[in-house]
Image (tube, rainbow, N blue to C red):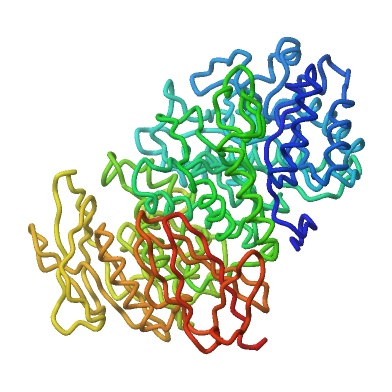
């Protein structure tokens, strides 16, 4: 059972907009029939419904919504009820134009689009609170409503006078004095000192954009304003009498907001996933999608919800490609494997007009039951029904790869050493991919989260250190942890001011080296790293590197590999240093994927870090969820060829939701062989040793 939603089932369903079909009651009746056929047990409603819920100021019309919630509940279908704040009605924009955003050029936007509202606007907050209170009072205790969906895909920013004042107040609360701000932002450069907080403006192409401290703090402020609005809506729901859990749907690799700050106002993280399947090898897309699932799971370190996915083709990607047969099931079960307690779609019934009329849906414009998509959705529903035992199970990870919003913001705004691509996400992905290839669960924490539970911590391109992160890393290593760091780490403080006295800041002693220079390579350039003879890791291959090559001076660290080319041939490219009870490995260049694969294979062997299988074929994902008594290994083949995986002893295949523990031909002391066709998913169970 999911401890938050109270459900004993994996949620299956998605965005439903019955308000678009109120003139067609026969269609609404058919929807129920099709939902039940497809094993749909949950819908999310009200997300963009403000104009129907409150067609005129102060005139609320909830009957249509109540009728649908009741009818769905009577048919075993739960509702995730949304607050409608993501898109304000026309009457509000006309009467109160101040609710509309002002962009960075200081021009007010016209009515239209989504998220075109100001978080600071008293009017918008007043109207939002009023409708949220009404919804909470009306539906907050309804047994068919299982949770609240706050707004939709938070994003965007406003530069209006109200937000400028809020920004100045936020800065004054943070820095206390204008002298402290000037020092933190290094405003003496170009004579940009401020004499008072009232002089400060948000970044603009018409004004200041070269103070990196200003740019960084503005991004932090936008996150704080968004968080404040989210908490404001949550409080309105609570004041309306509902204590049901709250979520907000996040987005893929979204850089506009620090999700770690937003998620502390949520009971459950949810997110919207729209991979571009079939654009390249399916496994390449699967690795990227899996990493995003794990980022979302790590935010609260508990099961999340896949709030939106597409049952067919989107309408907004560069090429809106259909999912080939079997792809929907594989993608849906991948979310479950990585910790989701749901597979929810946008949309359940295809809109007849406007922006998303050609976005894929469970029920299309034809409206019949005999479509390929509805058959595939039904198949997913059947699989989820048989996997209900996974609901609420946790993910235990012994390896972590740091993924930090603030460091990324600062690094990509820093103007050097490459302005045409630092490839931060790609660098994170290389370590993540190599560890996942070993069948290991992987967390992706930021600098605010604890690292103590991990045997291996990877810190790629941690350009900015905040919250005494260097001390925490040092303590982690001193206590016996294994730390892998890369180039371009520990360069600046939390205000994007360069550290003096050498880098990586605070960790030179632990790493046994000091960074001296970093070389940005042109796109057509590459260098190479070759192993030294008899190195401690037994590295034997030569690997290529591109984009960035850091030069370091060792002070006690062992050189495992060195550069082969250019004036820095012979400089270290991989080092190792024993520090107190732990070990620090330092990677000096943007190495090719094969380097990371080999490095982590050797480290995992040294540390006895193991997944469910010793050898995992290319293209196969192995992920483990646990209920504390049993481990469940989910095997998925994202390659285009059949694959065989030999699991360690004790794993037993689960067929149609039934666990076959021991039979004459299946003893727990034998290894289990899994044969997987392309896009096939199999689930295995193993009783934990302490429970055996």
The quarter of the picture where residue 629 lies is bottom right
> Is 35 in front, or is 445?
35
Residue 294's place in the image compared with 21, above or below, is below
Residue 597 on image: x %, y %: 31, 67
Residue 351 on image: x %, y %: 64, 23
Residue 632 on image: x %, y %: 59, 71
Q: Residue at x 59, y 57 (%)?
A: 336
Horizontal side of 575 relative to 285 (left or right) equals left
> Is 461 in front, or is 78?
78
> Is 318 in front, or is 558?
318
Total marks shown come to: 0
The quarter of the picture where residue 74 lies is top right
Residue 114's place in the image compared with 465, above or below, is above
Q: Which quadrant does the N terminus fall into? A: bottom right
Horizontal side of 120 relative to 464 (left or right) equals right
Horizontal side of 562 relative to 252 (left or right) equals left
The quarter of the picture where residue 531 lies is bottom left
Q: Residue at x 42, y 76 (%)?
A: 646
Residue 92 on image: x %, y %: 75, 16
Q: Which quadrant does the C terminus fall into? A: bottom right
Q: Residue at x 54, y 43 (%)?
A: 273
Residue 285's place in the image compared with 50, above or below, is below
């Amino acid at each position: 059972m999911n401890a938050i939603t109270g459900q004993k089932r994996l949620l299956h369903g998605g965005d439903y907009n019955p308000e678009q079909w109120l003139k067609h009651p026969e269609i609404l009746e058919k929807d129920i029939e099709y939902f039940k056929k497809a094993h749909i047990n949950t819908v999310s409603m009200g997300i963009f419904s403000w104009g129907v819920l409150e067609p005129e100021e102060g005139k609320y019309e909830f009957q249509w919504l109540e009728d649908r919630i009741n009818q769905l509940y009577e048919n075993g279908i739960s509702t995730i009820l949304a607050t409608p704040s993501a898109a304000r009605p026309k009457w509000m924009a006309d009467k109160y134009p101040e609710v509309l955003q002002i962009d960075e050029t200081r021009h007010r936007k016209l009515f239209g689009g989504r998220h075109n509202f100001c978080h600071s606007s008293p009017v918008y907050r007043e109207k939002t609170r009023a409708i949220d209170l009404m919804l909470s009072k009306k539906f907050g205790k309804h047994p068919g409503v299982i949770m609240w969906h706050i707004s939709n895909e938070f994003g965007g920013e406003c530069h209006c006078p109200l937000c400028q004042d809020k920004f100045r107040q936020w800065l004054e609360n943070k820095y206390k004095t204008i002298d402290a701000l000037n020092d933190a932002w290094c405003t003496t450069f170009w004579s940009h000192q401020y004499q008072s907080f009232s002089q400060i403006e948000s970044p603009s192409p018409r004004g200041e954009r070269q103070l990196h401290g200003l740019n960084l703090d503005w991004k932090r402020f936008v996150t704080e304003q968004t968080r404040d609005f989210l908490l404001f809506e949550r409080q309105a729901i609570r004041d309306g009498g509902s204590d049901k859990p709250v979520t907000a749907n996040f987005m893929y690799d979204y850089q506009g907001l620090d999700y770690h700050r937003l998620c502390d106002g949520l009971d459950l993280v949810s997110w919207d996933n729209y991979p571009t399947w079939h654009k390249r090898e399916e496994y390449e897309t699967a690795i990227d999608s899996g990493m995003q699932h794990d980022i979302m799971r790590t935010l609260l370190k508990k099961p999340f919800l896949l709030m939106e996915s597409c049952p067919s083709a989107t309408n907004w990607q560069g090429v809106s490609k259909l999912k080939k047969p079997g792809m929907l099931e594989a993608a849906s079960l991948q979310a479950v494997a990585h910790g989701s307690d749901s597979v929810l779609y946008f949309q359940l019934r295809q809109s007849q007009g406007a922006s998303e009329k050609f976005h894929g849906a469970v029920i299309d414009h034809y409206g019949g039951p005999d479509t390929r998509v509805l058959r595939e959705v039904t198949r997913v529903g059947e699989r989820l029904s048989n996997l209900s035992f996974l609901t609420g199970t946790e993910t235990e990870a012994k390896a972590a790869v740091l993924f930090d919003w603030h460091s990324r913001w600062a690094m990509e705004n820093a103007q050097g050493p490459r302005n045409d691509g630092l490839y931060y996400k790609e660098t994170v992905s290389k370590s993540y991919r190599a560890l996942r290839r070993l069948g290991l669960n992987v967390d992706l924490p930021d600098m605010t989260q604890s690292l103590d539970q991990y045997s291996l911590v990877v810190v790629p391109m941690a350009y900015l250190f905040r919250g005494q992160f260097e001390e925490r890393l040092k303590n982690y290593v001193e206590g016996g942890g294994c730390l892998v760091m890369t180039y371009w780490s520990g360069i600046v403080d939390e205000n994007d001011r360069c550290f003096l006295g050498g880098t990586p800041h605070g960790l030179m002693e632990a790493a046994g080296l000091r960074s001296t220079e970093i070389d940005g390579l042109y796109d057509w350039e590459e260098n190479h790293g070759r192993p030294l003879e008899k190195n401690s890791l037994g590295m034997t291959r030569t690997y290529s590197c591109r984009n960035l090559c850091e030069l370091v001076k060792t002070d006690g660290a062992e050189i495992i590999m060195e550069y082969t080319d250019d004036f820095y041939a012979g400089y270290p490219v991989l080092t190792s240093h024993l520090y107190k009870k732990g070990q620090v490995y330092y990677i000096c260049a943007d190495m090719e994927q094969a380097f990371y694969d080999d490095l982590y294979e050797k480290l995992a062997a040294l540390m006895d870090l193991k997944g469910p299988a010793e050898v995992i074929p290319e293209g196969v994902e192995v992920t483990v969820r646990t209920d504390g008594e049993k481990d469940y290994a989910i095997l998925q083949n994202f390659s285009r060829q059949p694959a065989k995986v030999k699991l360690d002893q004790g794993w037993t295949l689960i067929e149609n939701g039934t666990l076959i523990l021991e039979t004459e031909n299946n003893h727990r002391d034998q290894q289990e062989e899994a044969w997987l066709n392309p896009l096939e998913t199999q689930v295995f169970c193993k009783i934990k040793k302490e429970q055996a």
